[in-house]
Amino acid sequence: MSQEIRVRFAPSPTGALHIGGVRTALYNYLFARKNGGKMILRIEDTDQSRYVPWAEKYIKESLDWVGIEVDESPEKGGPYGPYRQSERKDLYAQYAKKLLDEGNAYYAFDTPEELDAMRERLKAARVASPQYNSVTRMEMKNSLTLPEDEVKAKLEAGEPYVIRLKVPRKEEIRLNDMVRGWVMVHSSAIDDKVLMKSDGMPTYHLANVVDDHLMKITHVIRGEEWLPSAPLHVLLYRFLGWESTMPQFAHLPLILKPDGNGKLSKRDADQHGFPVFPLSWEDKAEQVSGFKESGYLPEATLNFLSLLGWSPGNNEEMFDKEALIENFTIERIGKAGTKFDIDKAKWFNQQYLKRKSNAELAVNLSEQLAKVGIEVEQSVKEAVCNELKERAVFLNDLWEMGSFFFVAPLNYDEKVAKNKWKAEAVKVLEGFSNKLDSETEILTADKAKALFEESLNQEGVKMGKVMQSLRLAITGLGSGPDLMNLMEILGSSEVSQRIKRAIEELKVQA
């Protein structure tokens, strides 16, 4: 590609960024990096009625968290700024005027009540999709139906108006989408969309076309929900004289509910207990947890999202960011929606957690220990992480699954105690505790096993009859990490004390 590739992610700061939006940003980013291009973040804040002040910061922090770097943005600047649409208002007005002057747009003075009445008339006439279009506009109050002097008087008097696109009545509009191939829509199916609102702000349709042209965007990669608007945008490019430099479009497949029935929503997350936002979100109405706060690693989240619609063409699943950039192509994005499988997200998280060094994992474990006022040596924390990393799914599991490494159990699994805490087990454990008390060398896993086997042999009991009881005494649980390694980490004194306490607490079970 000889032309510099320029893509943009253009979210609206109206609330939390949906995880589907992060996927859109990711595909833009991967395409730009694969082709040596630029990634632009543009804030589309033309809808001031729904604007949320802290949403822009949330968007930036979300992209930063998953590792999507932008080249131009409101914060970074760039040669085609400003990068907030609210700061580009004068630009849109001049292009709206061009459309008006050339007869491709018109003023509409209809009140909300008049618009409602029009829709009711069409419903009564059994029109399936009532809309303001090439037919109905001739019955409404606009600069196509009113005398020129009356239009001028209304404008001079400051009467509220919108500017609408004048869609041709009989024309087939064609679009070659990079994902879906040729898309053809008849102009009769397109309504005369509002381009400029009564408050003087542009709608998405005008603003995004003008901005994409002025920012030299070469490829528009966005969600499937914008596909119905694409023919309208093609018309705008043509009317503004930019058809020859119009960007290529790629409309991404929907992310579906886990059962595949419909688009994934926040309600699904509430229902099934999984996040659909990258970071936690809090406002007056709600407080919801994000992928980050739920314990997902950014690199695992990125890998998971990359495969929600894109396939590498083989069975490979594990891709770090560099591998994604190397392998990504738009040609391998599917048309069909893809199910949101939270269990797969957990699997990815587990794989990436396993890959981390014990020292890296110990950083998170240290934070969790600090919250409960526990201090231990770095070597101990790393040893604990080594024992738990194969079983942990989330970083918080290191504490939640392994708190017994640091705190002696206060309670014991009742089912295990009832079935396994027998007199012969107690005798073996008493002998083992005494041997530990007499031990002068540092307890290793091999040494712990040897001492335990000595205790078993002395009582003539097989290991299988006592192992769960030993685990119960040390951890309070019936299962967990390797028991000999666990005892090595705890040390002979701590293990002996825990056994003695369990014998005292559970003696009625024997």
Image (cartoon, helix red, strand yellow):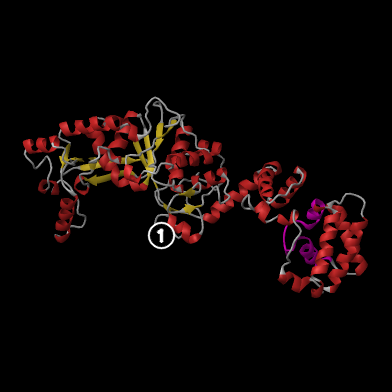
Name the residue nearer the viewer: 163 or 449. 163
Is any part of residue 465 visible from this angle?
no
Give the quarter of the image for residue 250. top left
In which quadrant is the N terminus drawn? top left
In which quadrant is the C terminus drawn? bottom right
Q: Is residue 205 above or below residue 473?
A: above
Badge 1: residue crowd in 10 Å (few <14, some 14–19, many ≥20): few
Which residue is denoted by mark 1 in the rendering?
261
What's the amino acid at mark 1? Asn
Residue at image point 49% right, 60% down:
272
Residue 475 lies in the magenta-colored region:
yes
Give the quarter of the image for residue 476. bottom right
Name the residue nearer the viewer: 113 or 41. 113
Q: Is residue 259 above or below residue 161?
A: below
Residue at image point 15% right, 55% down:
117
x then y, percent, for residue 158: 16, 37
Q: Would residue 280 be found to the left or right of residue 191 on screen?
A: right
Residues drawn in magenta: 463-489
Residue 355 lies in the magenta-colored region:
no
x then y, percent, for residue 192: 20, 44
